[in-house]
């Protein structure tokens, strides 16, 4: 690894310390940006760093920019190339996190999304666990409702929308929980502050459908594929009531940052026996093999950097 950490800013790879925006920047003042969170996993046997589902992340970024009405200044192919160049320049030989952001770079006063210049930047840093995924999370249902599609659409990963997540997460932490689950305005289970939700009940794996104000998670998709193809489980996308969380057999959150995060209790009620459920544990182990490029049938999800 080089001593300087590099990032991508204004069309070139520059030291992270030089990648600076003005306090006048529109995105800083109004949250008018969209972003992605991508992980890279070091595989010591292969001496290789694998970027997990890189294309899918940039395709979703493209979707977020379309929703916001931004013109993303690069194609998905270009973004994949920029990412590999950036990671190579940093020379990372460990697990990393990548944060590409597309933002309104204008230095003007006034809230709107159209006819303003859009910039693109990305940083890349060494990164380990985001939340404790070993012992099972204590989760609380939040009093903060998930933002609705015609407020700030959750399917777009909009920077400003994360204030909704931050309210929920802080409330959870201050109340002694590890994480929050938010409900929709109708009172259905939506998602965590930065994770999708799955429950195991009646031998089926159940998750809220994409129109329950969730970010359509890439890990969510990964879990659905693995559970169906490897564990022969039926996947059901349907509306989930709050109290189903209290009676299900297993519950876990998933996301790029959280990975597979088993839940041991919800609103002080143990999930199943409490602790980490057997399916969640098996899924977690398998997921780590997949992301490190150890499972041939899912190797296409892993982009080698070196
Ligand atoms: N929901 C929200 C609100 C998130 O921020 C994230 C993390 N990106 C997720 C779900 C999980 O998405 P993914 O699996 O694509 O990281």
Image: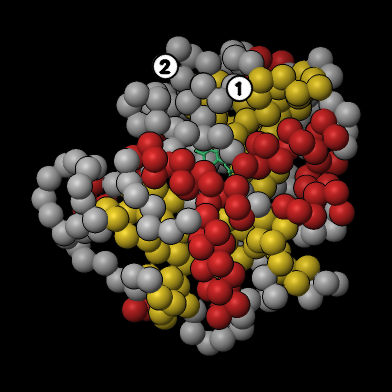
Whether residue 242 is visible to the viewer of this picture, yes or no, is yes
**Quadrant into which the N terminus falls:** bottom right
For label 2, the SS is loop
> Could you say where residue 183 lies in the image, as x and y percent from the top left?
49, 22
> Which residue appears at 60% of the width and 52% of the height?
55
Q: Residues within 10 Å of mark 1 (few under 14, many from 20)?
A: many
> Which residue appears at 80% of the width and 27% of the height?
273
| Closest to the observer, 304 or 179 | 304
Of mark 1 and mark 2, the one earlier in the sequence is 2
Do labels 1 and 2 touch, CB within 8 Å?
no
- Left or right: residue 177 versus residue 161 is right
Relative to 293, residue 207 above or below: above
Q: Quadrant of residue 44?
A: bottom right
Mark 2 CB near ligand 1 (8 Å cut)? no
**Residue sticking out furthest to the left:** 109
> Which residue appears at 43% of the width and 27% of the height?
146
Whether residue 98 is visible to the viewer of this picture, yes or no, is no
Q: How is the image coloured?
A: secondary structure
For label 1, the SS is loop
| Closest to the observer, 92 or 201 | 92
> Could you say where residue 155 lies in the image, as x and y percent from the top left?
47, 34
Mark 1 CB near ligand 1 (8 Å cut)? no
> Could you say where residue 32 lies in the image, as x and y percent from the top left?
29, 46
Q: Please give the residue where the numbered disc 1 appears in the rendered image.
A: 208
Q: Residues within 10 Å of mark 2 (few under 14, many from 20)?
A: some
Q: CA distance from mark 1 to mark 2?
A: 14 Å
Q: Please give the residue where the numbered disc 2 appears in the rendered image.
A: 185
């Amino acid at each position: 690894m080089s001593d300087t950490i590099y990032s991508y800013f204004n069309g070139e790879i520059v030291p992270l310390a030089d990648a600076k925006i003005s306090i006048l920047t529109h995105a800083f003042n109004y949250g008018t940006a969209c972003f992605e969170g991508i992980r890279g996993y070091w595989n010591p046997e292969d001496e290789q760093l694998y970027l997990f589902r890189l294309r899918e992340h940039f395709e979703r970024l493209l979707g977020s920019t379309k929703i916001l009405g931004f013109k993303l200044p690069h194609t998905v192919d270009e973004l994949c190339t920029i990412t590999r160049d950036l990671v190579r320049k940093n020379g990372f030989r460990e697990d990393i996190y990548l944060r590409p952001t597309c933002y309104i770079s204008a230095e003007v006063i006034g809230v709107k999304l159209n006819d303003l210049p859009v910039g693109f930047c990305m940083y890349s840093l060494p990164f380990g666990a985001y939340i404790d995924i070993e012992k099972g999370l204590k989760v609380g249902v939040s009093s903060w409702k998930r933002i609705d599609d015609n407020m700030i659409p959750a399917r777009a990963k909009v920077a400003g929308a994360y204030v909704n997540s931050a309210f929920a997460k802080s409330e959870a932490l201050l109340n002694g929980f590890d994480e929050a689950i938010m409900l929709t305005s109708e009172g259905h289970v939506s998602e965590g502050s930065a994770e999708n939700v799955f429950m195991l009940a009646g031998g089926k794996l159940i998750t809220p459908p994409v129109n329950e104000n969730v970010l359509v998670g890439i890990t969510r998709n990964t879990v659905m594929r693995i559970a169906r193809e490897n564990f022969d489980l039926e996947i059901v996308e349907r509306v989930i009531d709050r109290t189903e969380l209290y009676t299900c057999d297993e519950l876990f959150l998933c996301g790029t940052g959280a990975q597979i995060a088993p839940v041991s209790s919800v609103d002080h009620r143990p999930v199943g026996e409490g602790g980490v459920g057997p399916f969640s544990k098996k899924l977690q182990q398998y997921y780590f093999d997949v992301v490190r490029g150890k499972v041939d049938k899912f190797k296409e999800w892993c982009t080698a950097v070196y």
